[in-house]
């Protein structure tokens, strides 16, 4: 009987901006105990990939981990696997940044462990064939991908017991399939089930020295719900390692480099663009995702289901940019900074003060490419404001460093361009104190307001939209919070809820959560109507394209206008709308003014209300150091209701930002928290995405033919007192 080789590739990562206590818990429940268990079984060899950002965190807080890992590397038990330092989706970043990410990771591992990696972990196994050249040029000899990719290329599961060769333009790269059968039994089934799968490699002689590889998250060994007790306290990992050792007469654990050095590839292959099965489902629009899941369930009931399933694929990862405009904007802001960096890099001489500034900017740029906040599924951090905020902060810090190298940034440039490739022009405003994206085509709104002194994007919110998993919440399939008695199940099979009655909070916005959106609606409406999205506003103003009447590179106010029709009390009245947006900054203070004017030459008998929407996200809805302030009264950011005051303030003592809002005539301030219901590995959860503030003026019939109002924002970065 032939020998069977087993290659375990364990992946560990924490997003840029994740909370320290979350990473610490993962360290104590997963990263540390996993290595401590393996070091007691020196004959079991494996591969380990840990993202650079996580290694940095561990290096600072737990140097003992480096000592433990270093000893395992030195004795040949562990092969370190490289990849992108900040765990980017490689196909989503420019070619020079791919090189920088991979080489930075290799340099770090070589510096700390004396081992330059031969393999690379492809983030979220998001693959397209064009990556071959980038990986090979960066010194990568092999990558680990899910068997999904290979099955979609036409192979049978029985053919995935080895490695393959691919190439792009004649440049070769080895590919290692990670088997789903192993990913779903380890650690969720007893060790005997994994050994049963591995033993199948002894059957027949067509593929001698079969390789069974599994690449998966270390977090499933202790962090996923129920797994810490199962894996460590109840002894699953110790039983698993002991039984693997006991099978040494026919089973050998190996590192991938050693196996590749001793065994030729099984053949040549070219893989389609793909990721793992769940990711490709998450990337689909909500309706298509439902249909895809239904199709999978129907196929599962068919004869020869597995033969059919391998040809079923969902969407591709870049579709998240179409599914979520917020992700697309973040991505295109990153590309803008990358272009600025590359342009500066061509001008700057090495080993100069400017080169050191450029290096600082690059570190922040690469950190902003961390994958998590660009997508959403059971995993993914797009719905996590603190993760989006961390990437935006990194981008802003890179912009601040680059501003030092570009004196032209001080001239307040204004560009009109389709920067985010949506087919509509945006206005980009850049200044040493701030930067913003104005969207004439989306109601003449502002979608990004980056305040550089504090390093934050003050908007950074998320539109509430339908998600396919909301169906599960509405059906209330389960609200259990405990794992099954026989052991934990995979996250993909769990339906948990962090609190009851979350389905009552499901609301779906009609518009993106930007600032300066214009609402015109019946005066009888109340704040509750705004909360429940039943203002019956004139969509001819709120959601359509406004005309930008002034273009160029001057710091003059941006003037927008719209010809609309108002339908009220059986009337259809022509309406001219105009608004100007002007930003002025000095030092660490930004003043942003918006003037609105509505005019008509026909009488309007019914009283109306004009609302100008603001959206700001200071992240912590119930923290005592972040609050609304009006007439000396503090309200938490999760406040919901109406405030009558000439002035409203939002204060963030932690980030040291104060937003003062003034309006003329005196308005009413309607405030509602923006709360999404999203799904994470720990279940359905409510997430605060900022506060929507509608500045409301009542328009009496006598106010026509023209009604004008002013809204002024003063944003200040203040020192701790």
Image: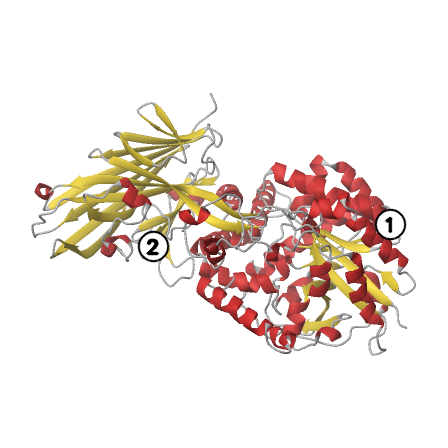
Q: Element at badge 2?
A: loop
Residue carrying label 1: 41
Name the image quarter holding residue 92.
bottom right
Give the left or right position of residue 442, taking residue 310 as reference.
left
For the N terminus, which image quadrant? bottom right
Q: Nearer the viewer, residue 587 or 661?
A: 661
Q: Closer to the N terminus: mark 2 or mark 1?
A: 1
Is there a contact, CB below 8 Å, between mark 2 and mark 1? no
What scheme was used to colour the molecule?
Answer: secondary structure
Q: CA distance from mark 2 to mark 1?
A: 57 Å
Q: Residue furthest top?
A: 721
Residue carrying label 2: 510
Q: Residue furthest front?
A: 485
Q: Element at badge 1?
A: loop
Mark carried by residue 285: none
Q: Nearer the viewer, residue 1 or 656?
A: 1
Rendered residue at 60%/57% (across/down)? 492
| Residue 315 % position (x, y) | 53, 67
| Residue 149 % position (x, y) | 64, 69
| Callout count | 2
């Amino acid at each position: 009987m032939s020998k069977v080789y087993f290659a375990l590739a364990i992946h560990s990562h924490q997003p840029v901006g994740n909370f320290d206590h979350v990473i610490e818990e993962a360290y104590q429940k997963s990263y540390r105990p996993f290595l401590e268990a393996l070091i007691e079984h020196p004959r079991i060899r494996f591969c380990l990939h840990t993202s650079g950002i996580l290694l940095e965190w561990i290096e600072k807080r737990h140097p003992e981990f480096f000592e433990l890992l270093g000893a395992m590397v030195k004795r040949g038990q562990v092969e370190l696997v490289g990849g992108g330092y900040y765990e980017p989706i490689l196909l989503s970043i420019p070619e020079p940044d791919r090189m920088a990410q991979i080489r930075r990771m290799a340099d770090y591992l070589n510096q700390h462990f004396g081992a330059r990696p031969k393999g690379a972990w492809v983030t979220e196994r998001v693959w397209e064939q064009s990556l071959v050249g980038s990986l090979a040029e960066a010194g990568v000899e092999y990558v680990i991908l899910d068997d999904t990719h290979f099955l979609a290329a036409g192979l049978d599961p029985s053919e995935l017991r080895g490695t393959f060769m691919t190439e792009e333009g004649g440049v070769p790269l080895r590919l290692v399939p990670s088997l789903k059968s192993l990913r779903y039994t380890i650690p969720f089934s007893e060790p005997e089930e994994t050994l049963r799968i591995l033993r199948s490699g002894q059957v027949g002689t067509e593929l001698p020295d079969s390789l069974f590889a599994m690449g998966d998250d270390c977090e499933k060994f202790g962090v996923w719900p129920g797994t810490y007790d199962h894996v460590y306290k109840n002894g699953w990992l110790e039983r698993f390692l002991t039984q693997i050792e006991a099978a040494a007469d026919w089973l050998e654990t190996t590192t991938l480099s050693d196996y590749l050095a001793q065994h030729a590839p099984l053949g040549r292959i070219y893989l389609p663009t793909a990721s793992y099965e769940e990711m490709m489902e998450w990337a689909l629009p909500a309706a298509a995702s439902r249909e895809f899941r239904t199709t999978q369930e129907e196929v599962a009931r068919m004869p020869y289901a597995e033969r059919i399933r391998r040809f079923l694929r969902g969407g591709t990862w870049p579709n998240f940019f179409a599914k979520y405009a917020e992700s697309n904007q973040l991505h295109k802001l990153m590309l803008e900074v990358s272009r600025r960096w590359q342009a500066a890099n061509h001008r700057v001489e090495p080993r100069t003060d400017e080169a050191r500034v450029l290096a600082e900017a690059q570190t922040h740029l690469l950190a902003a490419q961390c994958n998590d906040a660009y997508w959403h599924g059971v995993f993914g951090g797009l719905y996590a404001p603190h993760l989006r905020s961390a990437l935006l902060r990194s981008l802003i810090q890179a912009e601040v460093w680059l501003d030092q190298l570009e004196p032209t940034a001080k001239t307040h440039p204004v560009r009109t361009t389709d920067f985010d490739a949506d087919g509509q022009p945006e206005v980009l405003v850049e200044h040493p104190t701030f930067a913003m994206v104005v969207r004439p085509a989306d109601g003449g709104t502002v979608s990004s307001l980056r305040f550089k002194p504090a390093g934050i994007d003050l908007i950074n919110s998320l539109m509430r939209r339908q998600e396919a998993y909301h169906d599960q919440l509405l059906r209330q399939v389960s609200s259990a919070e405990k794992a099954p008695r026989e052991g934990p199940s995979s996250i993909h099979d769990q339906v948990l809820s962090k609190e009851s009655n979350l389905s009552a909070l499901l609301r779906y916005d009609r518009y993106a959560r930007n600032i300066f959106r214009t609402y015109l609606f019946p005066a009888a409406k109340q704040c509750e109507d705004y909360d429940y999205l039943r203002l019956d506003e004139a969509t001819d103003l709120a959601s359509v394209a406004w005309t930008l009447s002034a273009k160029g590179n001057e710091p003059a106010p941006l003037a927008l206008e719209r010809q609309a029709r108002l339908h009220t009390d059986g009337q259809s009245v022509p309406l001219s709308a105009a608004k100007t947006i002007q930003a002025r900054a000095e030092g660490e203070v930004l003043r942003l003014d918006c003037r609105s004017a509505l005019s008509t030459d026909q009488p309007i008998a019914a009283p109306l209300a004009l609302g100008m929407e603001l959206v700001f996200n200071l992240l912590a809805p119930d923290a005592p150091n972040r609050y609304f302030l009006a007439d000396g009264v503090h309200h938490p950011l999760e406040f919901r209701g109406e405030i009558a005051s000439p002035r409203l303030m939002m204060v963030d003592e932690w980030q040291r930002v104060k937003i003062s809002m003034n309006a003329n005539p005196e308005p009413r301030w309607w405030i509602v928290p923006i709360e999404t219901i999203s799904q994470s590995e720990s279940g359905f959860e409510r997430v605060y995405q900022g506060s929507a503030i509608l500045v409301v003026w009542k328009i009496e019939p006598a106010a026509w033919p023209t009604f004008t109002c002013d809204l002024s924002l003063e944003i200040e970065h203040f020192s701790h007192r």
